[in-house]
């Protein structure tokens, strides 16, 4: 698949952008704060309706139009999948905007989504445009908070499996209701036996998430293994390990019945703690992923350099995963990642991504690319929210 045309209106520092993109490599060069990351993140947003940086959606609308009577931002993408063309559109607009003493007071942001002109829910948009984003912040996936790894699993799985997203939405709803009940029990306003119903709902919605995460991590592990072997000059054996909250000791849980059983067992064991805290302590919202090199946990003990290489192996295997799961080459977005890498890893990365249908790379500096690579790429310049062929 590839992104044929991108159109932005009032998105971040892009007041108006109409950009045709070729089905191969494009390199976007520009100084700092010109709009390189915003450009790639607009594509990420069209693919997932989420921003890769966790920011409030109102920040996506251009500042200067926020003062207008009806501020909005619009993003659209023409996707080509084989012979089939698809038009994706997102409009962001505050539900209400009023003016108060010369200042715009903006209500909550509404998201309007259309696929081929027909209104859709966010869940229907995900999976239309598959992408993998490489960013300098990927290193946080290895050494950062578990929440980042869960978010990563959720975005990756949602892109390849619509049912995963449905299960996740259901799970989050059940979780918040169960937490509400636990607080009420703690306050003496509900009876503990009311939990039994919500336990079953939690297990029902959560089991699918656990199974899918388990399978995805097993497949990413198989793909990352040889990639990391190459990137580390055969010095490091990388293992990705799923650490489900329902059974930390057994990363391999088997099928549905085993997962349901383990889930119920863990809920039973955690009951006193959950009642005391008034909080759900067991389930996919507490999962984690471990990265082991030569059996040592790299999240805790890895050097910055090791973590960075693991992040790169993970992203390259994610691209392969996306390809094998969907049968379509995902769009690869590389946001300023070359400067972080030594020449050998840089060469490996550029070689690996060249095998994909479409690759968009941002950089401050064209010197980082081998001249043969640049000769085959389409080149653009990014300056102050504008993109011009270079
Ligand atoms: N809502 C917005 N309206 C206008 N400008 C914005 C908005 N959000 C961010 N910007 C600006 O966009 C500029 C470009 O950001 P970015 O794409 O991150 O630059 P870079 O080229 O360094 O990757 C920054 O100067 C930032 O202040
Ligand atoms: Mg940037």
Image (cartoon, rainbow, N blue to C red):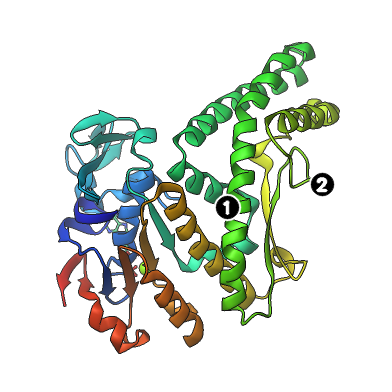
Q: Nearer the viewer, residue 79 or 280?
A: 79
Can you give x and y, in whole percent of width and height, for residue 76 in the image? 21, 47
State the CA–CA distance, disc 1 to disc 2: 22 Å
Looking at the image, residue 363 lies above or below residue 188: below
Q: Give yes or no for contact between labels 1 and 2 (Cβ–Cβ under 8 Å).
A: no
User: Residue at coordinates 33% horizontally, 71% vertically from top-left?
Assistant: 362
**The quadrant where residue 273 appears:** top right
Q: Looking at the image, in which quadrant does ligand 1 appear?
A: bottom left
Q: Return the disc, 1 or 2, that comes first in the chain's sequence.
A: 1
Instruction: Answer with the quarter of the image where residue 353 lies.
Output: bottom left
| Residue at which label 2 appears | 249
Indicate the position of residue 79 as horizontal and vertical percent values.
23, 49
Residue 182 screen position, x and y as percent: 72, 22
Mark 1 sits on what residue?
Answer: 148
Vertically, is 353 above or below 342? above
Q: Does residue 181 show up?
A: no
SS at mark 2?
A: loop
């Amino acid at each position: 698949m590839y992104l044929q045309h991108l159109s932005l209106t009032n998105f971040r520092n892009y007041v108006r952008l109409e950009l045709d993109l070729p089905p191969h490599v494009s390199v976007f060069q520009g100084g700092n704060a010109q709009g390189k990351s915003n450009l790639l993140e607009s594509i990420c947003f069209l693919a997932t309706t989420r921003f890769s940086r966790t920011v409030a959606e109102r920040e996506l609308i251009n500042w200067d139009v926020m003062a207008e009577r009806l501020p909005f931002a619009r993003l659209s993408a023409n996707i080509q999948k084989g012979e089939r063309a698809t038009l994706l559109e997102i409009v962001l607009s505050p539900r209400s905007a009023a003016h108060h003493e010369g200042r715009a007071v903006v209500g909550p942001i509404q998201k309007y989504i259309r696929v081929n002109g027909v209104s859709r829910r966010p869940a229907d948009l995900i999976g239309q445009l598959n992408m993998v984003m490489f960013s300098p912040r990927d290193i946080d996936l290895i050494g950062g908070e578990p929440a980042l790894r869960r978010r990563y699993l959720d975005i990756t799985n949602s892109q390849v499996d619509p049912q995963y997203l449905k299960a996740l939405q259901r799970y989050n709803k059940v979780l918040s209701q169960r937490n509400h009940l636990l607080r009420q029990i703690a306050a003496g306003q509900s009876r503990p036996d009311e939990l039994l119903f919500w336990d079953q709902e939690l297990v029902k919605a959560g089991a699918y998430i656990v199974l899918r995460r388990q399978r995805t991590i097993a497949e990413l592990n198989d793909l990352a293994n040889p990639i990391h072997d190459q990137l580390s000059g055969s010095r490091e054996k990388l293992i990705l390990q799923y650490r489900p909250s329902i059974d930390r000791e057994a990363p391999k849980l088997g099928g549905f019945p085993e997962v349901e059983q383990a889930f119920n067992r863990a809920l039973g064991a955690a009951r006193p703690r959950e009642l005391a805290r008034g909080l759900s302590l067991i389930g996919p919202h507490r999962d984690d992923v471990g990265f082991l090199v030569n059996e040592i946990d790299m999240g805790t003990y890895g050097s910055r350099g090791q973590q960075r290489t693991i992040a790169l192996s993970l992203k390259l295997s994610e691209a392969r995963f996306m390809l094998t799961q969907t049968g379509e080459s995902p769009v690869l977005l590389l946001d300023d990642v070359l400067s972080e890498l030594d020449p050998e890893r840089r060469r490996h990365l550029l070689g690996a991504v060249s095998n994909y249908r479409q690759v968009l790379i941002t950089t401050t500096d064209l010197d980082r690319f081998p001249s043969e690579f640049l000769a085959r790429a389409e080149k653009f310049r990014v300056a102050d929210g504008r993109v011009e062929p270079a």
